Image (cartoon, grey):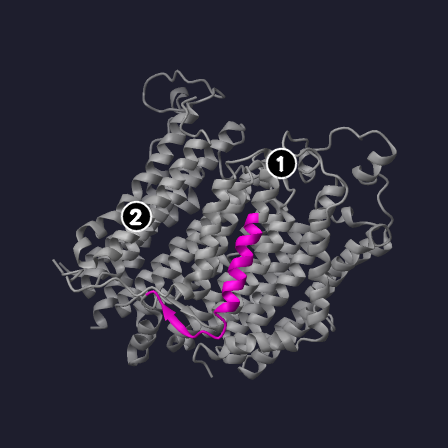
């Protein structure tokens, strides 16, 4: 039983070695041709149209981040949805409290004007 | 597939009485956030901090109401016992001081008051959760609820570059710490098959599992992760940078309360769940403590920024407190908790004076800002003097009693050399605490007197550098400060007085921490 | 399949993340590597959860997912704030604080 854990440690060491090897290999054998395009903010192969120092779409980042935050909360609803009947009203109350709190956050974000597209 | 949830599961019995301090803190956090949206600027600036003080007061009352409770709540996820309750008291006191220090601060104004105080309260809730955590899930949730608001709080002075930088730096270092701790927790779970502290302890108590490589790797990763959080060498490098860059009230909060929470976890996780692996982590932590004491004390020598100096000093103090964890005795637990309480008073006095001087002079947190303070403002100079003497461990202060208690615990726990390290560290520490006192009482006040005094005599002396501390910066909300800051003075004087009081009459504090030691089932 | 394989992958992912955090300088990449570390731990948790046949590890894993999202959002928010102030976006250049 205990012996069977030993591979885990071996693999932890191996993991470190492999990870380190990748990092080292990447910097050693990776081609490094610094073309002007690669130094541009966006490396998509096309000449970059974005000038450095330009104001970039903050709203986009803001809304994307807010989306991630609210989106990930669904992960707590899945387990409850699966076992809602088993837990009965307890789970329902908990879910309602949880969602109300989410709405408070949503209302706050709204009132603070983070959802305005500027 | 394995049956994860069977149909007969019932919702856990929730003991709302036991949870009530936490509910007060989190409810207060939500309330403060909403109130921060309403009303005029002036009302917000006064109502929001008052409300958060109210929430802290409610949590304090509910904590006292729960006194002497010994129970596991929420399916054994949390343990309400004397240790958790005493740590709660220290945390709430620290947070209340922070609210007072931040009342007129730029940080709170920039974060629209509501956000600042909501983050503060939820961070305290995380700490309180952490102090009571009894399984690894609650531990991790508490740790993150503590850390994530703190990352933001560090960065709240958006107009000041150092504040943002310190926030990002703290975020990266703190997240590495959390991830390391989490991997360690995963390994301990893998070795024992449970997330419950008592379950882990009983799994580790039967035979060879305690020396199993998986367990030991997990323990090592947990040590590393928690050392990141409590700034124990060699994982302390971020501390001076972050402490210096963060807004001073937030630095005060971080310095005191994160230590309380981190040592709460150290005590509960290491001295309860991992007690059977003590032979493995005990000596390792003892060595870390010694290194921390030396590194912190040597690093603090010659720092000209008071916040950096206090950051290194807090590293050293963490080393002292680790000694109480290492020995795994009731005496050790009591000594650690006693020192945490003393540490609250000593540090709050010092930080309150720094906050006051940052607003009165344009020298920021440099040691020069204190020059001549003894003659000019004795009400600020005395708390700072007391605090420095207490941190150095001079008799008749709470710091001396705390160190004495820790050394006693270390020696009777068989770690005499750790006691010697504490003494040596305290001697080195005089080398950087005494110059602060000397600056206050022996040096002349700088030629450029404080803007507030100057404004009485002469026209306002031009715009001050934004880095000086911020309060001099004009803001549409609130404007420049008037000279008097009674709430900061109150914190400084009260904390200084408490330091002396518990140094001369330590019995009430001894009684308070007495029960904390017996709840963990140690000898 | 043996648990060891899952653990191997999780250890590799975690170590890759840890090495990335230490060696990379772009804060965005550092955030990515932090996510790798957390997800490596998550994989280990879920593998162990299956091995022991209880749900504890999965519950922790769900919590970790949300925590990771919060951390990354705050990190991105700070990076955007730093970018708007035209500060250097390079963790090694953020060394003004060191003395």
Left or right position of B54 against A11: right
Magenta span dominant secondary structure? helix
* Residue B42: mark: 1
* Among the 4 quarters of the image, the one containing residue C31: top left
- The answer to whether A57 is drawn above or below residue B396 in the figure is above
> Bounds of the magenta span?
B51-74
Q: Which residue is drawn at 54% across and 50% down?
A: B238
The answer to which of B234 and B411 lies nearer the viewer is: B411
Seen from the viewer's position, the closer of residues B405 and B342 is: B342
Q: Along the horizontal axis of the image, is C31 left or right of B285?
A: left
**Residue B241 counted in the magenta span:** no
Percent x, y for residue B131?
46, 64
* Crowding near the residue tagged with mark 2, few <14, some 14–19, many ≥20 C-alpha atoms within 10 Å: few
Q: Say if the magenta span includes residue B52.
A: yes
Q: Is residue A19 visible?
A: no
Return the mark for residue A96.
2
Instruction: Please state, as top left, top right, bottom left or bottom right, where the N terminus of chain B lies in the image.
Output: bottom left
């Amino acid at each position: 039983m205990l012996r069977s854990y030993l591979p885990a440690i071996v693999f932890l060491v191996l993991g470190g070695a492999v990870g380190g090897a990748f990092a080292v290999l990447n910097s050693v054998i990776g081609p490094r041709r610094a073309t002007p395009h690669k130094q541009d903010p966006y490396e998509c192969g096309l000449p970059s149209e974005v000038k450095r120092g330009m104001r970039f779409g903050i709203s986009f980042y803001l809304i994307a981040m807010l989306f991630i935050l609210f989106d990930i909360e669904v992960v707590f609803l899945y387990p409850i949805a699966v076992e809602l009947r088993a837990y009965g009203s307890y789970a329902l109350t908990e879910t309602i409290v949880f969602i109300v709190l989410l709405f408070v956050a949503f209302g706050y974000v709204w009132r603070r004007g983070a959802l305005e597209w500027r | 597939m394995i049956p994860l949830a069977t149909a007969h599961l019932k919702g856990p019995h929730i003991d709302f009485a036991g949870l009530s301090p936490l509910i007060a803190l989190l409810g207060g956090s939500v309330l403060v956030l909403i109130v921060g949206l309403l009303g005029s600027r002036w009302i917000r600036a006064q109502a929001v901090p008052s409300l958060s003080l109210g929430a802290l007061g409610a949590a304090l009352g509910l904590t006292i109401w729960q006194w002497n409770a010994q129970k596991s709540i929420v399916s054994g996820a949390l343990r309400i016992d004397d240790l958790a309750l005493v740590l709660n008291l220290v945390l709430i006191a620290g947070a209340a001081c922070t609210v007072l220090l931040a009342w007129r601060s730029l940080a709170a104004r920039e974060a629209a008051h509501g956000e600042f105080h909501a983050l503060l309260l939820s961070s305290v809730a995380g700490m309180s959760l952490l102090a009571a955590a009894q399984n690894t899930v609650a531990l991790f949730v508490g740790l993150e609820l503590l850390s994530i608001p703190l990352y933001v709080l560090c960065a709240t002075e958006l107009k000041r570059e150092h504040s943002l930088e310190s926030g990002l730096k703290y975020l990266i270092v703190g997240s590495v710490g959390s991830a390391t701790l989490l991997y360690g927790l995963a390994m301990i779970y893998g070795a024992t098959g449970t997330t419950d502290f008592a379950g882990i302890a009983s799994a580790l108590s039967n035979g060879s599992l305690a020396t199993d490589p998986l367990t030991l790797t997990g323990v090592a990763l947990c040590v590393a992760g928690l050392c990141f959080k409590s700034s124990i060498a060699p994982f302390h490098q971020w501390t001076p940078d972050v402490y210096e860059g963060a807004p001073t009230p937030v630095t005060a909060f971080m310095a005191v309360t994160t230590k309380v929470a981190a040592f709460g976890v150290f005590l509960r996780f290491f001295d309860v769940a991992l007690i059977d692996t003590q032979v493995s982590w005990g000596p390792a932590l003892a060595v870390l403590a010694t290194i921390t004491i030396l590194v912190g004390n040597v690093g603090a020598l010659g720092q000209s920024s008071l916040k950096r100096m206090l950051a290194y000093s807090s590293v050293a103090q963490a080393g002292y407190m680790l000694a109480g964890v290492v020995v795994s005795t009731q005496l050790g637990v009591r000594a650690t908790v006693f020192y945490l309480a003393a540490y609250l008073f000593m540090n709050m006095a010092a930080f309150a004076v720094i906050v006051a001087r940052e607003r009165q002079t344009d020298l920021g947190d440099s040691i020069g800002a204190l020059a001549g303070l003894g003659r000019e403002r004795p009400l600020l100079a005395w708390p700072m003097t007391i605090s420095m003497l207490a941190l150095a461990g001079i008799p008749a202060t709470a710091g001396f009693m705390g160190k004495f208690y820790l050394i006693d615990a270390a020696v009777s726990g068989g770690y005499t050399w750790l006691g010697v390290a504490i003494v040596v560290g305290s001697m080195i520490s005089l080398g950087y605490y005494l110059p602060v006192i000397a600056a206050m009482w022996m040096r002349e006040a700088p030629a450029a007197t404080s803007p507030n005094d100057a404004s009485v005599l002469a026209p306002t002396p031009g715009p001050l550098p934004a880095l000086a501390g911020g309060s001099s910066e004009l803001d549409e909300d609130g404007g420049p400060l008037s000279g008097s800051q009674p709430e900061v003075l109150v914190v400084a004087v009260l904390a200084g007085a408490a330091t002396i009081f518990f140094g001369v009459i330590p019995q009430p504090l001894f009684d308070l921490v007495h029960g904390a030691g017996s709840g963990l089932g140690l000898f | 399949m043996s648990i060891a394989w899952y653990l191997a992958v999780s250890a590799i992912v975690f170590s890759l993340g840890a090495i990335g955090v230490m060696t990379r300088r772009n804060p965005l990449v550092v955030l990515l590597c932090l996510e790798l570390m957390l997800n490596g731990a998550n994989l280990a948790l879920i593998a162990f959860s299956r091995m022991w046949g209880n749900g504890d590890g999965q519950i922790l894993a769900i919590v970790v997912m949300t925590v990771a999202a919060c951390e990354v959002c705050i990190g991105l928010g700070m990076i955007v704030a730093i970018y708007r102030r035209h500060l250097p976006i390079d963790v090694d250049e953020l060394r003004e604080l060191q003395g």
